[in-house]
Image (cartoon, rainbow, N blue to C red):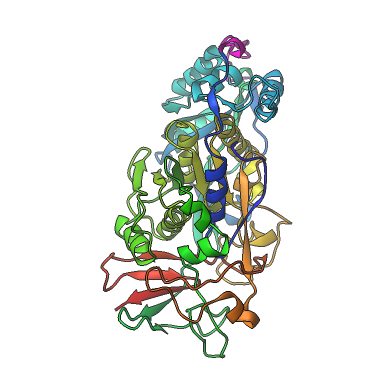
Amino acid sequence: MFCPRMLFLRTVIGSVSGSVVCALLCASVCASAVMAQQFNSVVPSRVVERVDDTRLVTLTGNTHFLARPQFDQGLADPQLRMERIVMVLKRSPQQETELDQFMVEQYDSKSPTFHHCLRPDEFGQLYGPSDADIAAVTSWLQNHGFHIYVVNKGYVTLEFSGTAAQVQEAFHTEMHHFLLNGKMHLANDRDPQISKALAPVVGGIASLHDFFPVHQSILGKYVRRDKKTGKITPVDPETSGPKPQYGFTNEEGDPQEDITPYDFATIYNLLPLWNAGITGKGQTIAISAVTDIEASDVSAFRTTFGLGGFTGTINQVHNGADPGVVTGAQVENTLDTEWSGAAAPDATVDVVITATTATTFGGQLSDSYIVENPSMFTIMSASYGGCEIGLGTAGNSTMNSIYQQGSAEGISMFESAGDQGSTGCDNSDATNFPAPAQYGLQVNGDASSPYITAVGGTEFTWQNYRTTYWSATNSASNLSNALGYIPESPWNGLAPVKSCWTGSGSPSTVLRRWSRSAITQS
C-alpha cells in the first residue's frame, strides 16, 4: 500500500533486498484510521434462510488438480487431525465495489481518505460479513463437531479444526492419500458442499490438501575461506550443471564473484541512503515463515559482512504451536531474514513462524497473522510459491483477500515471483530434471494478486568486463569488492542464487551459502 503497484526486480543475491529498500522509502505514509463519519458498522446480513443440510451447493474449483484417480491410494484415517483449516469468507458485490473505491481514494491526494489506513477490525466491520452471518457460519461448523480456532478480525478468513471424518460428514467430500513422484499426499477427492443458506458468505475451503507452496531456494555447494589469508578454495565443487561462484577463477578459467551486503549496497547505491540515515530505523519487517531459524546464523552473517555496527534486531514470533526447525524451509527463512537486514540494517526483522498442519500451509497462516497485526509490522516479505491452478478457486481467493486487507491497512507486501518459469505446476515434486510442462503456462499464485508486489529476478552479465565492475581485492571490513552498478538481465536459471549462513554458528565451523555455494571459515 505504501508504494504504487510497481514491479521490483530481485537481484541474484536475494528475494527481498531491493523490495525492502523501496518499502523503507515509501513506508509510513498511511496516517490515522479512516475518518469516523465514513465508518458504518451496520452491514446487512446475507444468511437469511434456515441452514438446512439437505439443501446443498457445491464449492466448485476446490479440488487439487493432481488429486486424480490414477494416483489415489485410498481413504485417509477417519480420525486424522486436520488443524487450522482455512475457510475464506465472501463480501457482497456492493462491499466489493466500495472497497475498490476506498483503495483508489487512498492514492488520491484530493480525497479525504488519502493515505488513511484501516485497522483490521474496521476492515472487517466495513467489508466483511455481518456479525450475525459470522455467527451462523461458526454455529454450523460447531454443530458438525469442529473447533473454531479463530475468526480473523478482518473477517476475511476463519480457521477451524477437526478430523477427516468430520470433514467428510460436513462437506460431503472424502480425504484420500495420493502418490505422486514417490511422495504421498493428502487431499479431498471431490469439491466440498455446504448448506445453500451459507453460500452468500462462504467463498470456499482453502486448505483441504497438502500440495503446499514450496520454498524458492536450493542449497549450493561448499567452499572454505581461510580467515588469515582470505583465500577461498572449493570443498566439493559441482561436476555438472551451472558452476558455483566462489569468488575466484574456476577450473575453466572463468572469473567468479560472490555478492555481499556491501556489494549490494554499492551496486544499487544504498550507501548514500545509509549515510543520510535511511537505514530502516523505526521499521519492522515481517518474514512470513514456517520454521524456527538459528539466531547465531544471522549474527555470524552480520558480523562477517560488516553489519555489526548497525542496531537492527532479529526476533522470532510464534503464531500458535512452535514447529521447531523444518529442514529445507530453514534455509529459505534464514535467507529472507539475513538479506532483509542487509538492505535495512537498522530495521527490526520479526520472523513470524506458523507450523504447517496436515492440510494447511504455515506460510499462509503467517501471512494472515501479519495482516491482522499492522501495528506490529510495516513490511512483509514471503518467498514461497505454488501455481494458481494448484491453489484452486478458494486458495487464490484467500491469498488475494489477505493481501487486499494488508494493502488497505498500509502494509508493504512482497512475494517472490518464483524461478520455475512457466512450469511451476510441473516440477515442485519432480525427481528428474528437466521436468517437462504438462499443465500449461502458470505463474506463482501466491504472487499474482494485484495487492502484492511480485519480486522477480535478475542476473549480472559481467564476466568479460570483470575489472570494470569488481576490484581485484576484497574489503577487509566487509568482504565487498563491487565498484558500482553492474548491467543486469532477467534471471534465467533453474534456481534462485542467494547467500546465507547455516550451521552451528561457531566462527571456526560456520557454513556460509554463497551463490550456489557455501563457505567454511577455518
| Most distant residue in the bottom direction | 252
Residue 13 image point, x, y percent: 52, 64
Q: Quadrant of the C terminus?
A: bottom left
Residue 464 within the segment the image draws in magenta? no
Residue 347 image point, x, y percent: 42, 46
Q: Nearer the viewer, residue 132 or 406?
A: 406
Vertical side of 71 occupied by 197: above or below: above
Residue 479 image point, x, y percent: 42, 72
Residue 76 appears in the picture as rendered: no
Vertical side of 171 occupied by 262: above or below: below
Location of residue 293 (image quadrant): bottom left
* Relative side of 6 to 116, left or right: right
Residue 286 image point, x, y percent: 45, 43
* Relative side of 188 to 353, left or right: right
Q: Residue at x 66, y 46 (%)?
A: 448
| Most distant residue in the right direction | 440
Q: Residue at x 58, y 81 (%)?
A: 467
* Relative side of 212 to 475, left or right: right
The residue range painted magenta reads 36-54
Q: Which of 171 and 234 is in front in this view?
A: 234
Residue 519 appears in the picture as rendered: yes
Disc tally is 0
Q: Which residue is drawn at 32% across and 57% down?
A: 294
Q: Nearer the viewer, residue 139 or 367?
A: 367
Vertical side of 281 occupied by 126: above or below: above
* Relative side of 482 to 330, left or right: right
Q: Quadrant of the N terminus?
A: top right
Q: Is the magenta stretch mostly helix, strand or loop?
A: loop
